[in-house]
Image (spheres, rainbow, N blue to C red):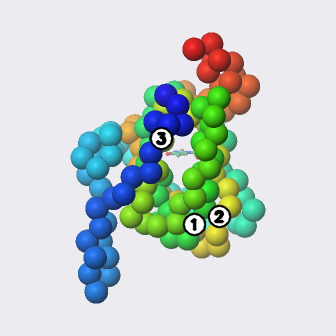
Amino acid sequence: MSVENCKVIDLPKISDPRGNLTFIEGEEHIPFQIHRVYYLYDVPGGSERGGHAHKALHQLIIAMSGSFDVVLDDGKNKKRVHLSRSYIGLYVCPMIWRELDNFSSGSVCMVLASNKYDEDDYFRDYSEFMLLRHQK
Ligand code: TYD
């Protein structure tokens, strides 16, 4: 599970003069079943979100409106990804520390997740996460 396993995914886009349409089917366009959707909005300028890793959760992060950056960190390598299109998703596999920053005003970050919310699935302590990553 490295940052190289985290991929930018081009989602299907039906272009239409009346407005474009994008759809996502679990296990079809993304490598997991969708069990939860959540979104961040009204994010004040300069805010940072994330700051944790998940033990088993798979996620797809989409900039539904505006833009922001996601910094991925597998304990060895880091990668910064800028998201600004609602037809592009960033797949984040388990055991990746992520931070979200550089939010534009009015941005909306939607996340599709492979499981329901479970606090026990989180690493919220970076040094604990690093310790575990370097044991493997
Ligand atoms: P957290 O995952 O830390 O947010 P972010 O990574 O976007 O900064 O969650 C923030 C709070 O919201 C935390 O108290 C847990 C709660 N929460 C839920 O109750 N359900 C959810 O699905 C999510 C994602 C968070």
Q: Is residue 91 above or below residue 13?
A: above
CA separation, marks 1 and 3? Answer: 19 Å
Among the two numbered marks 2 and 3 on one chain, the one whose residue lies closer to the N terminus: 3
Three-letter amino acid code of the residue under disc 1:
Ser
The C terminus, quarter of image: top right
Asked if marks 2 and 1 touch (Cβ < 8 Å), the reply is: yes
Q: Amino acid at mark 3?
A: Cys
Q: Position of residue 56 (x, y in %)?
A: 46, 28
Amino acid bearing label 2: Phe
**What residue would you read off at disc 1?**
67
Look at 42% across and 60% down and name the residue there: 88
- Residue at image position (40%, 37%) is 115
Disc 3 target residue: 6
Real-space Cα separation, disc 2 to disc 1, in angstroms: 6 Å
User: Which numbered disc flags the more N-terminal residue, 1 or 3?
Assistant: 3
State the mark number for residue 103: 2
Write the residue at 50% across / 62% down.
63
Q: Decide: is 36 above or below 73.
A: below
Helix or strand or loop: what does disc 3 sit on? loop
Rounded to the nearest angstrom, the CA distance separating label 2 from label 3 is 20 Å
Query: Residue 38: percent from the left, percent from the top?
Result: 47, 53
- Point out the frontmost of discs 1 and 3: 3
